Image: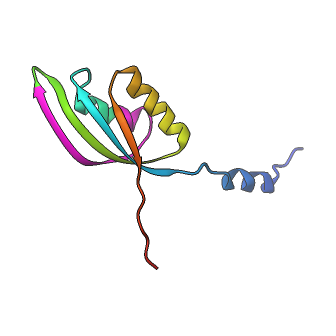
């Protein structure tokens, strides 16, 4: 009979990838609806986000403008998201969010 080794399970739980807080700005160019983009980021990639600002105009059912999102992701999650945005020809820029913490 094989019994699980509890020390191995503890080791797996301790390994976690470092997450970074980022501000992601996406330029909407009419190729994807704003609502579809937000749902894709959350449902397909599992990335929770906060909309910091959005300037979106709808012309003939297409979304134009820009949106700034606050996201907390690992580098792998961000690379997948960036690949998706580039594949769909959505210009994007990222700035690392740094917050001064007072003790």
Q: Is residue 57 left or right of residue 97?
A: left
Vertical order, 103 against 94 (above or below) = below
Residue 96, how many percent across, how many down? 43, 50
Which residue: 35% across, 34% down? 92
Q: Where is residue 25, by image quadrant?
A: top left
Q: Nearer the viewer, residue 40 or 25?
A: 25
In the rendered structure, the answer to whether residue 17 lies left or right of residue 10 reads left
Instruction: From the viewer's perspective, tell me whether residue 40 is left or right of residue 76.
Output: left
User: Residue 3: horizontal and vertical position, in percent?
Assistant: 84, 49
Magenta region includes residue 51: yes
Q: Quadrant of the N terminus?
A: top right
> Range of the magenta residues?
40-58
Q: How is the image coloured?
A: rainbow
The residue lying toward the viewer, choosing from 95 and 1, is: 95
Would you say residue 72 sits in the magenta stretch? no
Residue 44: x percent and y percent? Answer: 42, 31
9 lies above or below 64: below
Residue located 44% across and 35% down the image: 45
Identify which residue is drawn at 42% across, 42% down.
47
Q: Is residue 2 shown left or right of residue 63?
A: right
> Residue, x 50% and y 38% (percent of image)?
77
Q: Give the tally of numbered discs.
A: 0
């Amino acid at each position: 009979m094989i019994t699980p080794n509890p020390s191995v399970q503890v080791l797996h739980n301790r390994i976690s990838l470092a997450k970074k807080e980022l501000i992601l700005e996406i330029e909407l160019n009419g190729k994807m609806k704003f609502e579809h983009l937000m749902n894709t980021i959350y449902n397909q990639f599992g990335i929770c986000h906060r909309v910091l600002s959005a300037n979106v105009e709808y012309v003939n059912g297409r979304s134009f403008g820009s949106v700034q999102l606050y996201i907390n992701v690992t580098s792998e999650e961000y690379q997948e998201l960036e690949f998706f945005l580039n594949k769909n020809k959505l210009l994007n820029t990222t700035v690392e969010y740094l917050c001064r913490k007072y003790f």
